Each structure stands twice: as structure tokens, then as C-alpha cells.
Image (cartoon, rainbow, N blue to C red):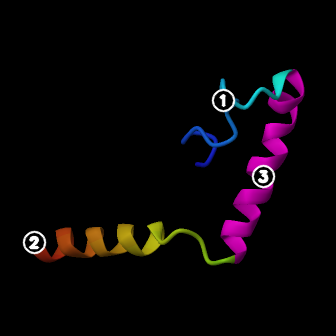
Amino acid sequence: MLKASGLGRARDGFGGGGGEEQFSSFLVQKQAEQMARAGGVGLAEAFFNAMAERQDET
């Protein structure tokens, strides 16, 4: 999910070159691990609530 959002993609102004591109996946992996340890970003609850509302409508 983080990779698809563009996190870890090299930015023009950062200037890390090839090394930045190669090691950015490690950064994204560690950020994902920290987010999981912290309980995520709340998407599961949002999806559940949306599905529950749609079920109530039928």
C-alpha cells in the first residue's frame, strides 16, 4: 500500500542518486512495520463502517 502511494520514490530535490533508489525499499518496509505495530492507519474500521452502512440500506 505504501509503495503504491509513492512513498519511497526518489524525489528530484533530494539528490540521493542510485543509492537512494536501491535503499528506499528498506525505508518503506520499516515504515510499514512501524505503522503495523502502532495499529495501522484505521482503514479496516473505515471499510467495516462503510460496508455496514450499505448493508443497512438494503
Dots 3, 2 in contact, CB < 8 A: no
**Distance from label 3 to label 1 (Cα)?**
18 Å
Q: Is residue 57 left or right of residue 12?
A: left
* Figure quadrant of residue 17: top right
Is residue 57 covered in magenta? Answer: no
**Distance from label 2 to label 1 (Cα)?**
45 Å
Dots 3, 1 in contact, CB < 8 A: no
Q: Considering depth in this image, is 54 or 28 the residue closer to the camera?
A: 28
Give SS at disc 1. loop
Q: Residue at x 46, y 66 (%)?
A: 43
Q: Is residue 27 above or below residue 57?
A: above
Q: Is residue 50 left or right of residue 23?
A: left
Q: Is residue 16 above or below residue 29?
A: above
Q: Is residue 20 above or below residue 51?
A: above
For residue 11, which numbered disc appears in the image?
1
The residue to which callout 2 is attached is 57
Give, as a three-letter code, the residue at label 3.
Answer: Gln
Give SS at disc 2. helix
* Figure quadrant of residue 49: bottom left
**Distance from label 3 to label 2 (Cα)?**
39 Å
For residue 43, which numbered disc appears in the image?
none
Q: Which residues are magenta?
A: 18-37
The residue to which callout 3 is attached is 29
Is residue 32 covered in magenta? Answer: yes
Give SS at disc 3. helix
Horizontal and vertical percent position of residue 23: 86, 37
Q: Is residue 18 above or below residue 39?
A: above
Horizontal and vertical percent position of residue 56: 14, 77
Label 2 crowd bin: few (<14), some (14–19), many (20+), radius 10 Å: few
Give, as a three-letter code, the residue at label 2.
Answer: Glu
